Image (spheres, rainbow, N blue to C red):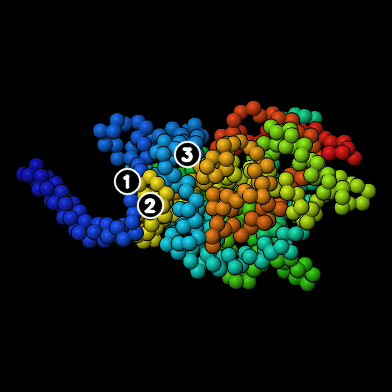
């Protein structure tokens, strides 16, 4: 009797599936086929199977296993670039367990998603859920009216008049310089850059710095906050993953929950202390725009205030620190580039300071005049984009303009709810756009007047959601690089190849290990 019942249940389930499939084909399927025909869509090429023979159905297990191996070896970006190359096209269909998604490094597809058809796309619920779990809902996790409101509150922070005051950069950069050894011993600049950018961002946005570089202060709370932020931003570093492998991603992570509470408590404490100081000094004449002040004026909801601050803090800290790490990792490897940069700094600084003082901190205007420095930064962002891949989710059935049938000019149907991953890392390294030396560090390409990569180069994204703080980030990075080059000789200490460390952003796995020697005062650079 039991066997008969189970057989009936199984037969009913199969029948229900067949009926639903027929209904789907007659409605949604027919509508999508008509939509695809109307727009001239062709199917994209499939990702090449690397593990299973073609005649064995693998339902995306091939991609999953390959990706897990690449994650462990820290070569995900290279493998995904190879997927595009092996398919012989710039857009492919990836089958993953449970779903399909598209991978592209085609600039026209990127432009369509980020700009021309902006309203057709969402950040994607998966990304929103992941980031908001520890950052809350703010400028990087909000959409629609909430996102526009966040952006408008933040905009005055990054007006030229605010960014042009380099005194905040100078204060914290000098504190960094004082910590650096000058005997040529190994030093990893990467964690120090993360402390520096945290201190700068908190003072700029909150009105009060965390002062994590001040070794005379009790740094325990700040260090715990930094570690908690990094733990939440890197799911592969979780205790569960270390203990159970990738199955740990699906298990409850108690440490992550504790880290989220620590992040929230620390931020709330900073907010409380800053508000108390503001009340005590409310008659002072400091007219500088402080983001925290503006949020408090707009709302008294502590969760909203904290979320907005954490959203922008993460971007202000991680992105600039990663950029600085990558630039200072490359400079000792290219003595001629470093020498040329020194010459530009000397010419610019000495030409506009009394007594030809080459050690004088640069002004905002002087930084803008350093074209070669900007070319170096552009090249670093090209080779090592801080956000090497991103995605959008289709809000309804739509198309991307290139890649159908494996060729440009033929659209691809993207069904509602599907994801398109745009691979910035691969796009930034396309020889057809950046030349045969696309995999080499060559700042000179940016000094060619005819060089215009357009949407093939998006270090700060593009369209309506283009990074609102890019001028601030670039000014901070340029200021720090100039001061370090003014102060130190550089010796290469790391002879490994660059490998990725993927978290919310991307930086070098090996850090930024260099040897530093003190430059003689008054020496021509």
Q: Are marks 1 and 2 in contact (CB under 8 Å)?
A: no
Query: Mark 2 and mark 3: span between their CA atoms?
Result: 21 Å
Horizontal and vertical percent position of residue 361: 82, 49
Report the mark closest to the observer, 1 or 2: 2
Identify the residue shown where x is 49% and y is 31%: 73
Which residue is denoted by mark 3 in the rendering? 81
Report the mark closest to the observer, 2 or 3: 2
Which residue is denoted by mark 2 in the rendering? 410
The correct choice, above or below, for 228 with respect to 28 in the image is above
Query: Mark 1 or 2 closer to N-term?
Result: 1
Query: Mark 1 and mark 3: span between their CA atoms?
Result: 23 Å
Using a 10 Å C-alpha cutoff, classify the residue at mark 1 as few (fewer than 14 neighbours), some (14 to 19) or many (20 or more).
Answer: few
**Residue 154 appears in which quarter of the rendering?**
bottom right
**Residue 394 appears in which quarter of the rendering?**
bottom left
Identify the residue shown where x is 71% and y is 51%: 476
Horizontal and vertical percent position of residue 434: 57, 43
Query: Mark 1 or 3 closer to N-term?
Result: 3
Helix, strand, or loop for circle 1? Answer: loop
Identify the residue shown where x is 41% and y is 39%: 88
- Relative horizontal placement of residue 217, taking residue 240 as reference (left or right): right
Helix, strand, or loop for circle 3? Answer: helix
The correct choice, above or below, for 105 with respect to 397 in the image is above
The correct choice, above or below, for 172 with respect to 122 in the image is above
Identify the residue shown where x is 20% and y is 59%: 26
Using a 10 Å C-alpha cutoff, classify the residue at mark 3 as few (fewer than 14 neighbours), some (14 to 19) or many (20 or more).
Answer: many
Which residue is denoted by mark 1 in the rendering? 98
């Amino acid at each position: 009797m039991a066997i008969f019942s189970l057989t009936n249940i199984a037969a009913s389930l199969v029948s229900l599936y067949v009926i639903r499939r027929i209904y789907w084909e007659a409605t949604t399927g027919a509508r999508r086929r008509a939509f695809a025909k109307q727009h001239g869509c062709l199917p994209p090429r499939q990702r090449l199977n690397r593990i299973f023979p073609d005649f064995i159905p693998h339902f995306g297990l091939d991609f999953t296993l390959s990706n897990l191996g690449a994650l462990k070896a820290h070569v995900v970006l290279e493998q995904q670039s190879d997927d595009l190359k092996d398919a012989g096209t710039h857009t492919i269909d990836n089958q993953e367990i449970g779903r399909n998604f598209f991978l592209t490094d085609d600039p026209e597809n990127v432009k369509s998603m980020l700009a021309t058809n902006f309203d057709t796309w969402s950040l994607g619920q998966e990304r929103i859920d992941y980031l908001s779990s520890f950052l809350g809902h703010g400028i990087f996790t909000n959409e629609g009216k909430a996102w526009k409101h966040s952006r408008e509150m933040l905009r005055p922070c990054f007006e030229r008049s605010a960014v042009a005051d380099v005194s905040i950069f100078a204060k914290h950069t000098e504190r960094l310089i004082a910590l650096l050894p000058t005997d040529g011993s190994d030093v990893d600049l990467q964690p120090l850059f993360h402390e520096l950018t945290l201190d700068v961002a908190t003072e700029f946005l909150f009105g009060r710095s965390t002062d994590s570089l001040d070794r005379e202060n009790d740094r325990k709370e700040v260090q715990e906050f930094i570690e908690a932020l990094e733990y939440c931003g890197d799911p592969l570093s979780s205790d569960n993953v270390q203990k159970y492998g990738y199955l740990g991603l699906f298990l409850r992570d108690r440490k992550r929950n504790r880290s989220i509470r620590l992040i929230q408590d620390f931020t709330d404490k900073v907010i409380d202390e800053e508000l108390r100081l503001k009340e005590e000094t409310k008659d002072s004449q400091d007219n500088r725009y402080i983001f925290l002040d503006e949020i408090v004026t707009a709302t008294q909801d502590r969760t909203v205030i904290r979320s907005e601050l954490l959203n922008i803090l993460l971007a202000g800290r991680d992105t600039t620190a990663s950029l600085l790490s990558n630039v200072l990792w490359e400079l000792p490897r290219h003595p001629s580039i470093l020498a040329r940069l020194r010459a530009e700094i000397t010419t610019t600084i000495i030409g506009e300071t009394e007594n030809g003082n080459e050690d004088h901190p640069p002004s905002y205007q002087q930084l803008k005049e350093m074209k070669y420095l900007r070319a170096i930064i552009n090249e670093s962002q090209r080779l090592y984009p801080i956000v090497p891949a991103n995605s959008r989710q289709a809000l309804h059935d739509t198309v991307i303009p290139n890649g159908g049938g494996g060729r440009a000019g033929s659209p691809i149907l993207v069904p509602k709810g599907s994801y398109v991953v745009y691979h910035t890392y691969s796009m930034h390294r396309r020889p057809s756009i950046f030349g045969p030396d696309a995999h080499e560090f060559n700042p000179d390409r940016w000094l060619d007047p005819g060089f215009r990569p357009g949407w093939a180069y998006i270090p700060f994204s593009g369209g309506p959601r283009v990074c609102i703080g890019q001028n601030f980030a670039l000014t901070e990075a340029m200021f720090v690089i100039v001061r370090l080059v003014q102060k130190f000789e550089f010796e290469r200490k790391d002879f490994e190849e660059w490998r990725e460390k993927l978290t919310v952003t991307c930086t070098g796995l090996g850090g930024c290990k260099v040897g530093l020697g003190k430059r003689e005062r008054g020496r021509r650079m």
